Amino acid sequence: MNILLEGVPNGMDIAEVRTSIAKVSGVTSVHDLHIWALTSGKPSLTAHVVHDPSSTPEIVREAINAILADRFAVFHTTLQMESVPCRLADEMDSFTAPAKHVGGQAEGYA
């Protein structure tokens, strides 16, 4: 049932995942983090990762993917690397919608 609902995989601690990503060298913050089970035993993750402007985003992304694979068995990821937080970073968090909606769409989204 959890798969049909695209829920967080059993035993997956979102706070622990967020903390692990945030501890990677070059990461300054993480927002809009989503983890769900697409199939049994195959979680998927998306997140916006703000990196230090002096870091190399590809290296930071590779380090994050290595930790996600090793510690959490997450191999399917989509990471949006940002040198500055996106406009809605303060409104977005794990599994939350932006606070304002216009015309049935989230403000700032096409």
Image (cartoon, rainbow, N blue to C red):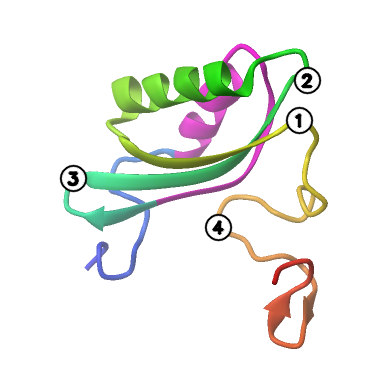
Q: Earlier in the sequence, mark 3 or mark 1?
A: 3
In the foreground, 97 or 87? 87
Q: The residue under label 1 is which amino acid type?
A: Ser
Q: Earlier in the sequence, mark 3 or mark 2?
A: 3
Q: The residue under label 4 is which amino acid type?
A: Phe
Q: What label sits on residue 53 in the rendered view?
A: 2
State how far apart marks 1 and 2 are (Cα): 5 Å
Q: Residue furthest bottom?
A: 103
Mark 4 vs mark 2, foreground winner is: 2
Magenta-colored stretch includes residue 90: no
Residue that appears at 42% across and 38% down = 13
Residue 25 picture location, percent across and down: 61, 11
Label pair 3/4, CB-CB below 8 angstroms: no
Mark 3 vs mark 1, foreground winner is: 1
State how far apart marks 4 and 2 are (Cα): 27 Å
Residue that carries the numbered disc 1 in the rendered image: 83
Residue 10 picture location, percent across and down: 28, 47
